[in-house]
Image: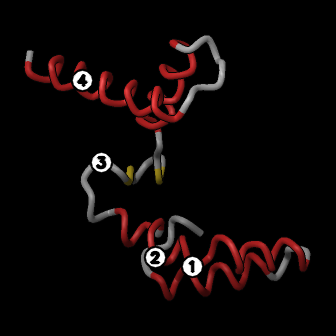
Amino acid sequence: MLDCDSEEEFLDCSMSITSKWSEPAVSYFERELQSDIIKHAGKWLLEEFDGLYDPYSGITNNLSESYNAVLKQENDWKELHVLLTCMFSVFISCKTLIILRL
């Protein structure tokens, strides 16, 4: 569904696919996911941003997954206070900018 080229195609595709789902699954999808996909995550929206949508692998989150892995490794997989998480984000952003400038 996320690979549809337009909102109309997404709605047609989602109707076809959700017709095979259980009622609780359809209800959850319609209540929690469908409008967010239409407003924020459809291919037709993401293609406007360079590098966010890959025509071969689709919608990718490799950067966020890599960032998450670094964060967890550096913290030995323990919970972090939100302030420490924010400070780590700033630290990584600064290091990334320095690397990019080299």
Q: Residue at left 68%, top 72%? A: 32
The quadrant where residue 33 appears? bottom right
| In this rendering, position of residue 76 left or right of residue 56 | right
- The secondary element bearing badge 2 is classed as helix
Mark 1 highlights which residue? 35
Q: Relative to 70, does residue 83 appear above or below in the rendering?
A: below
Q: Relative to 22, does residue 47 appear above or below in the rendering?
A: above
Q: Which amino acid type corresponds to the residue marked 2 in the rendered image?
A: Lys
Residue 11, position in %: x, y? Answer: 59, 85
Q: Nearer the viewer, mark 2 or mark 3?
A: 2
From the viewer's side, name the closer residue of 71 and 58: 71
Mark 2 highlights which residue? 39
Residue 25, position in %: x, y? Answer: 84, 71
Mark 4 highlights which residue? 96
Ranked by sequence position, the earlier of labels 4 and 1 is 1
Q: Quadrant of the C terminus?
A: top left
Q: Residue at left 47%, top 53%? A: 58
| In this rendering, position of residue 35 left or right of residue 24 | left
Q: Residues within 10 Å of mark 2 (few under 14, many from 20)?
A: few
Residue 57, position in %: x, y? Answer: 48, 47
| In this rendering, position of residue 17 left or right of residue 81 | right
From the viewer's side, name the closer residue of 39 and 21: 39
What's the distance in space between the residues labelled 1 and 2, CA to CA? 6 Å
Q: Nearer the viewer, mark 3 or mark 1?
A: 1
